[in-house]
Image (cartoon, rainbow, N blue to C red):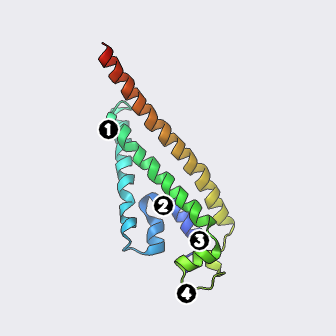
Amino acid sequence: MKSKTTAAWLSFLGGPLGLHRRYLHGWRDRWAWLYPIPTLIGLYGVARARALGLDDALSWVLIPFLGFIFAATALQAIVYGLMAPAQWNARFNPGAAPEHEAGASHWGTIFAVVLALMVGAGVLMATLAFSFQGYFEHEVDEARKISQ
């Protein structure tokens, strides 16, 4: 039986590595193996920014990959946590009764949803702000070059 609470926490904490997909769909799930790619791309951007400074243009392009994948997996944690027990069991526990305990929501599920909402929204807003700042700074620099 696959627990809704476990899936929500795995999506929130280990989602950028695809842990929730491996839990729900097994180790052969192709999407689970694709999740670490944008995570590693974003981490490489963070490493470049730390080594070369925030003026590095490539890091401005790479870092949002990390933010967007984290926001996406936080959204998946919210979706899993708010899924009705009958719908959860029909999708992930097909042999179980619609009201089986595995699809029930507990306080742990509620905490996962609340944290995923707070942190995921914050990460998404920070990623958008970081991306737009980099884009507009680049545009201002280009305009200065043209005007000189």
Of the residues shown, which amino acid type is indicated by label 1? Leu
Q: Nearer the viewer, residue 99 or 119?
A: 99
Of the residues shown, which amino acid type is indicated by label 2? Gly
Q: Considering the numbered disc 1 on the image, is that residue within a helix, a strand or a loop? A: helix
Of the residues shown, which amino acid type is indicated by label 4? Gly
**Distance between the Cα atoms at labels 3 and 2?**
15 Å
- Picture layout, residue 8 above or below residue 85: above
Query: Is residue 98 shown left or right of residue 2?
Result: right
- Picture layout, residue 143 above or below residue 92: above
- Is there a contact, CB below 8 Å, between mark 4 and mark 2? no
User: Going from the N terminus, do you reach mark 3 or mark 2 first?
Assistant: 3
Q: Which mark is residue 95?
A: 4
Quadrant that contains the C terminus: top left
Q: Which mark is residue 14?
A: 2
- Mark 3 surroundings within 10 Å by alpha-carbon count, few (fewer than 14), some (14 through 19), many (20 or more): many
The residue where tag 3 is placed is 4
- Picture layout, residue 17 above or below residue 140: below
User: Going from the N terminus, do you reach mark 4 or mark 2 first?
Assistant: 2
**Distance between the Cα atoms at labels 4 and 1?**
49 Å
User: Going from the N terminus, do you reach mark 1 or mark 2 first?
Assistant: 2
- Picture layout, residue 122 above or below residue 138: below
User: Going from the N terminus, do you reach mark 4 or mark 1 first?
Assistant: 1
Give x and y (percent) for residue 43.
38, 48
- Residue at 36% across / 74% down in the picture? 28
- Residue at 58% across / 55% down in the picture? 116
- Mark 2 surroundings within 10 Å by alpha-carbon count, few (fewer than 14), some (14 through 19), many (20 or more): some
Give x and y (percent) for residue 20.
48, 67
Of the residues shown, which amino acid type is indicated by label 3? Lys
Q: Nearer the viewer, residue 69 or 144?
A: 144
